[in-house]
Image (cartoon, rainbow, N blue to C red):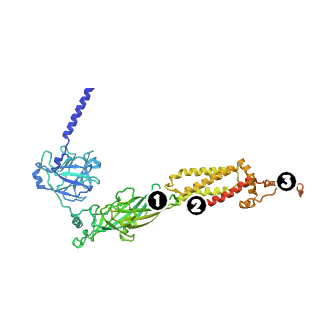
Amino acid sequence: MDWLRLLFCAVLVQLCAAGNETRSTFTYEMVAKCKEHICKHGYKYETFYKIDAEDREHVISDASVALEMHIAILAANNGHILLSTKANPTVTDPVYEIVVGGGSNKFTELRRNLRRNGKISKPTVGILSAIEFRPFFIRITTDGAVQFGKEGEEPLLDYRDNNHLAIRYFSFAAWNGVEAKFCYDCPPKGTNSSTTNSEAVDPLMSNADKLKAALLQDRAPHLPPASPVTIRLGFKITSLKYSPFTSKMVTGVAIVASWVDDSMAWNPDKFNNITKLTFSDGQIWRPTFFLFNSEDQGSVDIDNPGPITMVNSGEATYYFQTHLTSWCFNYAKTTNNWPHDDYHCSIVIAPWEPHEKITLEQISHADEKMAIFAESNKVIPNEWSIEWKQGVVEPSAWHTIFTANDNDTNQSDRFLVNIALRRRATAFNVVFYTPLLVLVLFVLMSFWSEPLQMSRVWFYAGSTVVICVGLCYVDYLVPIHTVPTILVLYITVMGGVLLALLLQVLLMTPTAERLCQTHSVQSLLRSSMFRILFFLPPVKSAENYDRINEAYSGEEDEVTPPRNGNIPEMETETPTPSERDEVAAALDWFLFLVYSLVIAVMLAMHF
């Protein structure tokens, strides 16, 4: 078995060695013999190269070969090669387009038109590399054979075109988000002279492109046009979301920035009456901002940045949208009136570059530059009603507010937006206040029911359990940075219910009965003022003055016989309330009065 293992390892080593011999490599010495093209703008053929036909005839020795190219590609995937009869072909023009490593580096395809009409495709997983150059060849014969493959190997793609093209131009492209580097006009392996000699073709430029090229010549795009530079800033809130649990506010905003660059002004009469140009982000300077009270200290991220528009007077306008996440909290208060809570938050926007001195001016909502946001960016309604004001804070005023910051470095203005938030609490009112009001109502009604009954004890106990269960889950809904007064209401009601439960149970004990028969309690119960105040019936006279409401024990009165001797007279006796019953009735009236006043005052303070 050991000799089989050794034999297998020897065969494996030989295979690896053979693979390394046949694998085409492209060293940096070979790169130095080529020309280079870099693609950074996605699937777009920007620069075309013209092939020198006369020079090619002297290099190619094989008369059957109409075109032979040796190239190398450094890309993660999607290296696109375009061969055409003219520069800047359209989608209807016949071309050869070779897609190398398409579909995330999984296939290679030959197309007969731009982006369509594929003729032959092969699976080629891992054909390109993002860390090393991969060499390839392209060969087109006079009889219409179009071949593409790895350098030193058999063609991967071999297509016979009966109506073959006379190639005079070629170009390169990549894919969106992919940066590709192409080496072209490379010599074949083992030689020093290339089979092609090409030159870049001047791109077709419109009058606007020529004007832009003239304005951007020898211009640093990262430097502001002046110091200080005045920027007119328009601000509109398009959405807002606030979380009381994290004290963070996410605000969707639409912003327009406008400034004047005198060095970019031009005379329309000299440039075919062109009065407006558009520049992409990075071609010219634009202001960059950051959020002062943000959760991070990076510059403001722009959602879907648009072009910078400039008119012939040099006035530039830049529209963009973004989402600002800012802190918003106030620990000065210990309570809040949630769910009718309100917050006062601020958004402070400042220039990002400290060396740029920027003066800000506010653009009103009635300005024509803000008209672009009139319909497309309506405020999305949610649980918060908002009111906001905006203004500019000068450096001198800012320095007096934030004295601890390094205010000598950044001398620019700040843009301040004050926002007042108030919760639309309709749903919360139904969920939280309805059970509270129903519970309060039944507790107050219980004081008018028959005292010293177990039914009332069970009612109080059940109410306590319900409130406790609700308070166990309410912390998932209620922010607890400060104490919501609605929790104070619930806890107060629960405390009142527990107090009523305790008093009810104590009055039902024999100790309470003996206490009610003491001389002090009897004296209090005989007081006419006490009985009037607590709506007790008048006290009855009794021979035993130590007890009240005792049945009269004098001589029996003369009984009047009934009118009809055959029908016995029905006599009803009203039960006489005991001292404990009267104390319980007086206590119920007292608790009803106190509870009503306390709950009414707390509700008024809450709202």
Describe residue 230's horizontal placement relative to residue 585 as left or right: left
Q: Where is residue 540 shown, x and y percent of the image?
A: 80, 57
* Number of other residues with Cα within 10 Å of mark 1, as a class: few under 14, some 14 to 19, many 20 or more: few
Q: Quadrant of residue 156?
A: top left
Q: Quadrant of the C terminus?
A: bottom right
- What residue does disc 2 label? 603
Front label number (2 vs 3): 3
- What residue does disc 1 label? 330
When the figure is inspected, residue 22 is found, relative to residue 276, above or below; the finding is above
- Is the residue under label 2 in contact with that under label 1 (CB below 8 Å)? no
Q: Where is residue 358 shown, x and y percent of the image?
A: 32, 66
Name the mark on residue 354.
Answer: none
- What residue does disc 3 label? 553
Q: For mark 1, give the secondary structure.
A: loop
Task: Judge whether residue 342 can be spotted in this image.
Answer: yes
Q: Nearer the viewer, residue 152 or 525?
A: 525
Q: For mark 2, give the secondary structure.
A: helix
Q: Nearer the viewer, residue 57 or 37?
A: 37
Distance Cα–Cα, label 1 vs label 2: 24 Å
Tell me the amino acid under the disc marked 1.
Asn
Distance Cα–Cα, label 2 vs label 3: 54 Å
Tell me the amino acid under the disc marked 2.
Leu
